[in-house]
C-alpha cells in the first residue's frame, strides 16, 4: 500500500529561488520498487528526481538513486548536492564531521561544506581524451549548427553519464546556440566557452541531453565536474573559477570550482522551496 514519505524540492546551483536547477527528493525511499521510482520521476517531469535509501557500503552515510524522466543515471551533480542538502536538513547522521559520503552507482562521492555552499569531489573520468570518431565530430557540428572551425575541441569528459564536451570560441557563441535536437539524438553533449577576463564568471556552459527527455539541462553538476578536470588539466582554467549556466532557459546558475591538494570540488548553493510529504 502507498505510504506517506518525506519529500522536498530544492533549487540547486543558485541562492535565488527559481534561478537554478530544481530537484525532487524522496527522503524515505526504502521499499520503493524500480518501477515506483521511475514512475514518480516521470510524474515530477524534472530533469532529475532522487530517492534516499540506507547505505549498503559501511563507509557511506546514505545511498541515492537518480532518475530522469527517461531512465536512471549512475551519477549526476546537481542531484548529489541537492540530495546531500536534503539528507542533512532531514536530520541525517554523518560518520565524519563536516563531510557527507554519498553512495551511488559509480561508487562513493564525498560532499563537504565550502563556506556557505556544499561541494562534491569531482569523480575521476571513466572516459577522457579527444573524440577520435569522425562521425561523432560531424554529428556534434551538425547538432550545434556551427561551422567546423568553431569547434575548438571535442573531448570525452565522461564521469558516468557519458558526457562529450565541445569547446567553442567564446561564451557569446555558446549562448547563441540553437541546437538541432533531432541531429543530436544519441549524444549527451556539453558545450563550454570562455567569458572575457574580469567578469564574475569565467565560462559559460550548456548541456544537451535529448535522449533522456531533457533537451537542455538548466545547470549540470556532472558535466561541470568533467569539464573542470579537463579544463584544469589542459591548462585552460585556473584552480578557482565560476561557470554560469542556464541563461537560455531563464536561469542564472553558478557553479563554483575549486581545486586543492585533495580533489577538484564542484560547489553551489542549494535553496529549499518545498517541504512536505508524498504518498508513494
Image (spheres, rainbow, N blue to C red):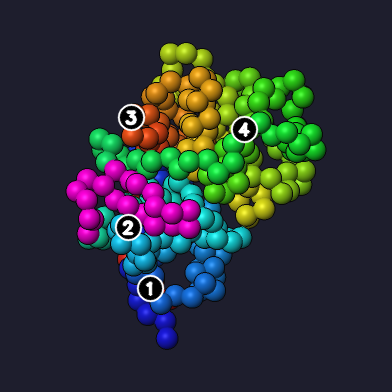
**Who comes first in sequence, dot 1 or dot 4?**
1
Residue topped by disc 1: 30
Residue topped by disc 4: 129
* Marks 2 and 3 close (CB-CB < 8 Å): no
Range of residues picked out in magenta = 93-112
* Marks 4 and 2 close (CB-CB < 8 Å): no
State which quadrant residue 39 falls in: bottom right
Q: Secondary structure at mark 4?
A: strand
Residue topped by disc 3: 261
The percent coordinates of residue 277 (x first, y second) are 34, 70
User: Which label sits in the foreground, 1 or 2?
Assistant: 2
Q: Residues within 10 Å of mark 4 (few under 14, many from 20)?
A: few
Q: Residue furthest left?
A: 97
**Who comes first in sequence, dot 2 or dot 3?**
2
Q: Secondary structure at mark 3?
A: loop
State which quadrant residue 91 falls in: bottom left
* Marks 1 and 4 close (CB-CB < 8 Å): no
Magenta stretch, overall SS: strand
The percent coordinates of residue 244 (x first, y second) are 48, 31
C-alpha distance separating marks 4 and 3: 23 Å
User: Which label sits in the foreground, 1 or 3?
Assistant: 3
Q: Secondary structure at mark 1?
A: loop
Name the residue: 22% across, 59% down: 93
Amino acid at each position: 500500500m502507498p505510504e506517506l514519505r518525506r519529500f522536498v524540492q530544492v533549487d540547486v546551483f543558485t541562492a535565488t529561488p527559481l534561478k537554478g536547477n530544481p530537484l525532487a527528493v524522496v527522503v524515505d525511499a526504502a521499499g520503493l520498487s524500480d518501477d515506483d521510482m521511475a514512475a514518480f520521476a516521470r510524474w515530477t517531469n524534472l530533469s532529475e528526481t532522487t530517492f534516499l535509501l540506507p547505505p549498503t557500503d559501511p563507509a557511506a552515510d546514505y545511498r541515492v538513486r537518480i532518475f530522469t524522466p527517461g531512465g536512471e543515471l549512475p551519477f549526476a551533480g546537481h542531484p548529489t548536492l541537492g540530495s546531500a542538502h536534503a539528507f542533512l536538513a532531514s536530520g541525517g547522521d554523518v560518520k565524519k564531521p563536516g563531510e557527507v559520503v554519498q553512495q551511488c552507482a559509480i561508487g562513493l562521492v564525498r560532499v563537504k561544506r565550502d563556506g556557505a555552499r556544499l561541494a562534491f569531489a569531482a569523480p575521476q573520468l571513466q572516459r577522457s581524451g579527444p573524440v577520435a570518431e569522425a562521425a561523432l565530430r560531424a554529428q556534434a557540428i551538425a547538432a550545434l549548427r556551427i561551422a567546423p572551425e568553431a569547434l575548438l575541441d571535442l573531448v570525452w569528459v565522461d564521469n558516468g553519464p557519458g558526457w562529450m564536451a565541445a569547446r567553442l570560441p567564446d561564451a557569446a557563441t555558446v549562448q547563441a546556440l540553437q541546437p538541432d535536437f533531432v541531429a543530436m539524438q544519441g549524444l549527451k553533449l556539453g558545450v563550454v566557452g570562455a567569458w572575457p577576463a574580469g567578469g564574475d564568471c569565467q565560462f559559460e556552459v550548456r548541456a544537451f541531453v535529448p535522449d533522456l527527455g531533457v533537451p537542455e539541462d538548466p545547470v549540470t553538476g556532472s558535466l561541470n565536474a568533467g569539464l573542470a578536470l579537463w579544463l584544469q588539466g589542459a591548462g585552460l582554467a585556473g584552480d578557482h573559477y565560476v561557470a554560469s549556466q542556464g541563461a537560455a532557459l531563464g536561469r542564472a546558475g553558478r557553479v563554483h570550482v575549486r581545486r586543492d591538494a585533495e580533489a577538484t570540488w564542484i560547489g553551489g548553493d542549494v535553496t529549499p522551496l518545498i517541504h512536505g510529504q508524498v504518498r508513494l
